[in-house]
Amino acid sequence: MAPARKTVNRVTIQLRGGNATMVDLGKMLGPTGVNMALVKKEYDEATASQRDDIVPVVVEIFEDRSFQLRYKTPPAAFLIRRELGIEAASAKPGQISAGTLSRAALRRVAERKLPDLNTTDVEKAMSIVAGTARSMGVSVAPE
């Protein structure tokens, strides 16, 4: 059995799927000494099907400067904005509405986010996503 590699750094980066920029990678990974070109290549290949979505990735860097990527689901706020077709959330949540999210759209976002949430129940995930929507100034349509 091979000895476990020691993690020396763990960085979470939010990048555009299938099109990571070296500038964004350089800001976060430059000080770590990891090969950014290899990270970009691996990230772009793995997220090509999610082009232009924001796909967070956790880059785990080991003592020998090797790395491992762990992909996450897009942020709930990004998914909500995309469902509504808006560019930004409300500047004054609670005072100015940014739109209304249907129950079906809420369920789609919750099901997409389910792997990264601390629940396995879709109804509870919908409640979590609804909270994010409210904080953005987006109301959720009643059942």
Image (tube, helix red, strand yellow):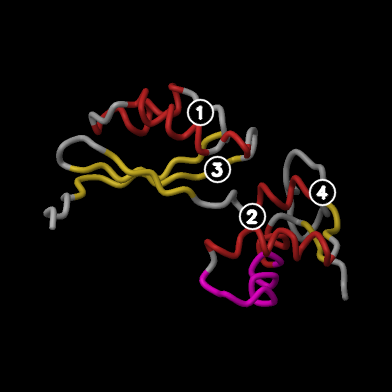
Residue 96 position within the rendered picture, expressed as x and y whole percent measured from the top left: 82, 53
Question: Reading the chain from its start, which is encountered first: label 3 or label 2?
Answer: 3
Q: Marks 2/1: CA distance?
A: 20 Å
Foreground label between 2 and 1 = 1
**Residue bearing the label numbered 4:** 84
Q: In this view, does 9 lie above or below 128?
A: above
Residue 125 on the magenta segment: yes
The residue segment tinted magenta is: 118-130
How far apart are labels 2 and 4 at the CA level?
Answer: 12 Å
Residue at (15% x, 41% y) in the render: 63
Where disc 4 sits, the SS reads helix
Q: Which amino acid does label 4 sit on?
A: Leu
Q: Residues within 10 Å of mark 4 (few under 14, many from 20)?
A: some
> Which residue matches tag 3?
55
Where is mark 1, residue-wise?
20
The image quadrant of residue 100 is bottom right
Q: Nearer the viewer, residue 84 or 110?
A: 110
- First in sequence, mark 1 or 3: give its number: 1
Q: Mark 2 points at which residue?
A: 76
Residue 11 drawn at (x, y percent) = 35, 44
Answer with mark 1 or mark 4, whichever residue precedes in sequence. 1
Mark 2–mark 4 CB contact (< 8 Å): no
Q: Distance between the residues labelled 1 and 3?
A: 10 Å
**Residue in the picture at 45% in, 44% down:** 57
